[in-house]
Image (cartoon, coloured by chain):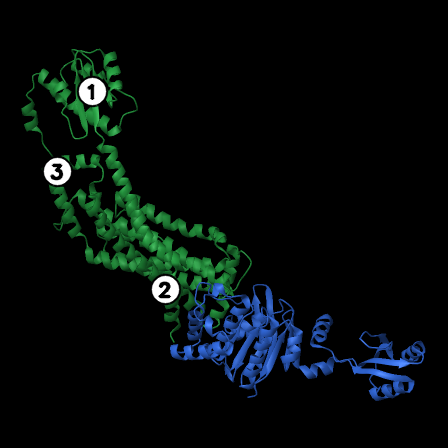
Chain colours: A blue, B green
Amino acid sequence: MNNLLEAHSVSKKFGDFTALNQVSISVPKGSIFGLLGPNGAGKTTLIRIINQITMPDEGKVILDGEPLQAHHVRDIGYLPEERGLYKSMKVGEQAMYLARLKGLSKDEARTRLKYWFERLEIGDWWNKKIQELSKGMAQKIQFIVTVLHEPKLLIFDEPFSGFDPINAILIKDEILRLRENGATVIFSTHRMESVEELCDQITLIHQSNKILDGKLTDIKRQFKTNTFEVGIRATDNLLLEKELSEKFLVSPANFKTLGNELKLNVKLSEKDIPNDLLSFLTSKGEVSHFVELIPSANDIFIQAIKNN
Amino acid sequence: MNHLALIIEREYLTKVKNKSFIVMTILSPIIMIALIAVVGYLSQINNNKERTISILDESGILKSSFIDTETVKYHILDNMSLEDAKIQVNKNEEYGLLYIGNFQDINKVGEHIKFYSEESPSLTLMSALESKLEKQLTDLKLEFEGVDIEKIKAARVSVNIGQESFIGEKTSKIDSVVKLVFGGLAGYLLFMFIIIYGNMIMRSVIEEKTSRIIEIIISSVKPIHLMLGKIIGTSLAGITQFIIWIILGSVLMTLLSLIFGVDFAQSTSGQQEILNQAMQNPDVNMEIQNAINAFYNLPITNLIIAFILFFIGGYLLYSSFYAAIGAAVDNETDTQQFLLPILMPLILAVYIGIFTVIEDPHGTVSTVFSFIPLTSPVVMLMRIPFGVPIWQQIVSFALLVGTFIFTVWFAAKIYRVGILMYGKKPSYKELLKWIKY
């Protein structure tokens, strides 16, 4: 079994509203899986179904080869998007309570918490009240509590919101380290740059339906338009632009250069070979810039949703 | 390991360690006792003030019946006109002037007695004066008609109907009063407990929603466990608070009466007078004996067991509603529309308990309402001191448990959906829809 988690045609309705319509996903073991979609697409509903907070109307979820059961809550660590802590409790008490709810014994919870508190440099917070903490500080506690019981599956819903850039990197590195140690991560976010950095696999949900899924590199290949960004210093820029636009689809490009190059986006057709373009260009002038335009996760996100 | 126990522990500890809870626990009995002490003390001062009343008796037949008491001194005026007397009394700052006119007919004397005073006189004093004068004039008239008063006194017959059930248990009116007090106390206690701690449960559910911790918790435990844990934890905190109140209250009461010598049982002298009068009456001594007997005659074991069972059943029934309401709304101001339908049967139960149980503890209305689950805990607790057949208690309790299981299921459904809903105030229609989710 290569997939840690599989959801098969999961549907969920709230009254007349369909929150999820026949959505299937498979999350390979040891991967970081991006669950993407605009607001209200149904991501949180799917995550709640995986956490057994809500039950699906149809379909089934398989975790590590078994249909989802009550005891699986201990194999999952979930950091919800809407997260808080009991305001009047002390940090240590609260972390102990949440850890014990996940099935850790008192001693075990204490040892592990001490370890994590040291690791994230918050050892002296143990006796502080949550009210005294900033949002970012509280997020650290929530992160620790999510990963403390060393679950097989970690689900992070917008994990970086509320963190400053330094702590965001700290948390990102921790997520990568957890993956190296064998955890599988489901990662739900709107921040596409972090998808780019972290995710191996993505699934895009839009209006309750899955519209896209697969390996991020495969999807990029699928979405690429064979367009090259070109910068060239020719003897006659206007003439060159005219010559190029006769052969290819050309549009003006915008990037920073030092001289006054001709800057163009050149879209090749199916049968054109990039090398031919390059040799054509070198014959016309000094090429300073030649880059294939790879669609960013952001572009893919926007385009996939527009197409739908 | 056991989730429910963990949740109960947390709920209990956070409640008990909460500052306002501690302050309320300690301060409430102190404030209550202080209030009682102040009221008692003030009414004592009020009554202990010595009053002087001047008597101008032109008929001359009533003078001798005024004897000074601890609080009222009588000042008999002679050979003075009414106008002069008024001026003098006013000048001496006496409490008032009682004027008795001179008539041949004793009835007329009675009709023309007047009391003059600066302010309107105390009601108790007036009725005391009236009864004193009435008695005196009646005696005089009887004497005038040639009746021997001693004979009349000797001929007076007192009646006290002794009550006895068919199996030979002696009862009395006092018996009913004692039963009523115990039943009323139990019912009222439950009522207060539900309102105070039901609200506390509701607030704590709302707090979990507004602090957004709920989704973290709910990914580890079942909503129904969280709800039950909350209800049980809060109840235990409530019981702790109640016990501390009772202990602290009685300790303070004893201390206070030792230090200040304020006798709370007989705080006002008016009551004291009635009590003193009653003590001279041999019948009352017997009545007190009856009251003590009545207390021992109460079905104590039945009362205690039923109290515990109905208290727990009734409390859990209502608190599951409170938990569901807390889950359905986002803040306390939105709770009003849902609280009303819950408070209605509760208040109804208390009124039915007070009015119909006194009238007839085994009448149709009180019997029916002691079976309806929403009112049964309060009404049944009020009826039990009067002796309710065991089968009725069992049926009523079974109904209560059945309803309780249903409402907990129902509340858990609303709870499960409601805790994850933010930002909108649901209608009843929506609540019903949630059950199907």
What residue is shown at x 27% (from left), y 37% (from top)? B42
Q: Are marks 2 and 1 on the same chain?
A: yes
Chain under callout 2: B
Q: Which residue is mark 1?
A: B54
**Most foreground residue, A260 or B176:** A260
Please, is residue A78 above or below residue B212 in the view?
below
User: Of the residues shown, which amino acid type is indicated by label 1?
Assistant: Ser
What residue is shown at x 36% (from left), y 60% (from top)? B316
User: What's the CA distance linking mark 3 and mark 2?
Assistant: 50 Å
Q: Are marks 3 and 2 on the same chain?
A: yes
User: What's the CA distance linking mark 2 and mark 1?
Assistant: 66 Å
* Residues marked 3 and 2 touching at CB (< 8 Å): no
**Most foreground residue, B116 or B71:** B71
Q: Where's residue B377, x and y in %?
A: 32, 55
Indicate which disc residue B12 carries.
Answer: 2
Chain under callout 1: B
- Pointer 1 local density, CA inside 10 Å: few below 14, some 14–19, many at least 20: many
> Could you say which quadrant of the image residue B412 lies in?
bottom left
Residue A93 in view in this figure: yes
- Pointer 3 local density, CA inside 10 Å: few below 14, some 14–19, many at least 20: few
Q: Where's residue B169, x and y in %?
A: 13, 50
Q: Are marks 1 and 3 on the same chain?
A: yes
Numbered disc 1: secondary structure: strand
> Could you say which quadrant of the image residue B284 lies in?
top left
